[in-house]
Amino acid sequence: MKLININPPVYVYTALLIMLLLHFLIPLVKFVYYPYTLSGILAIVIGIILNLTADSILKKYNATVKPMLETDVLITTGVFRKTRNPMYLGFILILLGTAILLGSIFPFVITIFFAVLMHFVFVLFEEKKLEDEFGSKWLEYKDTVRRWI
């Protein structure tokens, strides 16, 4: 799949840019208003913390963050005990928080599109790769830890 050669953060930056452009150039339906928009900051902060925490755990075990590269370690500690995809979840929370801050419809649509894209382009690919690499150890982890939350 061609999309897999582009690392996930590029998709996040692209989604953020598209969200901002659509919000300011075509401000259709605004349905989240101040002060409720400020709750988006919480989602952004949680998303950033989730990503930084997962990244530090990956570095601790000398594992790669690049989905197309092989790994020799299956990480099941820290945030990986609660979700199999903490970084993608963090990205989605960052986008959702941005959508809430902006309050218009297009950023929410982009967030949903991003989540679906990550699921089908990266998550399913990575899960198949991890099953091939770790076999029963992966299947046991997969049975005990949710894909998202």
Image (cartoon, helix red, strand yellow):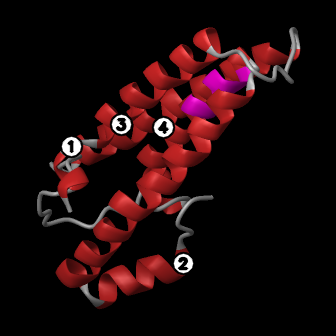
Give the mark nearer the N terminus: 1 vs 4. 1
The residue indicated by pointer 3 is: 11
| Magenta part of the chain | 95-100
| Labels 3 and 1 touching (C-beta < 8 A) | yes
Quadrant of image for the N terminus: bottom left
CA–CA distance in space, label 2 to label 3: 29 Å
Identify the amino acid type marked 3.
Tyr
Identify the amino acid type marked 2.
Thr
Give the mark nearer the N terminus: 2 vs 4. 4
**From where the camera sits, is residue 10 visible?**
yes
CA–CA distance in space, label 1 to label 4: 15 Å
Query: Badge 3 local density, few (<14 within 10 Å), some, or many (20+)?
Result: some
Image-based side of 12 in relation to 89, left or right = left
Query: Badge 4 local density, few (<14 within 10 Å), some, or many (20+)?
Result: many
Give the mark nearer the N terminus: 2 vs 3. 3
Image-based side of 91 in relation to 37, left or right = left
Q: Which of pointers 2 and 4 indicates the residue nearer the eye?
A: 4
The residue indicated by pointer 4 is: 91
Identify the amino acid type marked 1.
Ile
CA–CA distance in space, label 3 to label 1: 8 Å
Identify the amino acid type marked 4.
Phe
* Label 2: which secondary element: helix
**Which residue occupies the foreground of this view, 36 or 65?**
36
Query: Badge 1 local density, few (<14 within 10 Å), some, or many (20+)?
Result: few
Give the mark nearer the N terminus: 1 vs 2. 1
Name the disc covering residue 144, or none: 2
* Label 1: which secondary element: loop
| Labels 4 and 3 touching (C-beta < 8 A) | yes
CA–CA distance in space, label 4 to label 3: 9 Å
**What residue is shown at x 58% (from left), y 39% (from top)?**
111
Does residue 125 show up magenta in the picture?
A: no
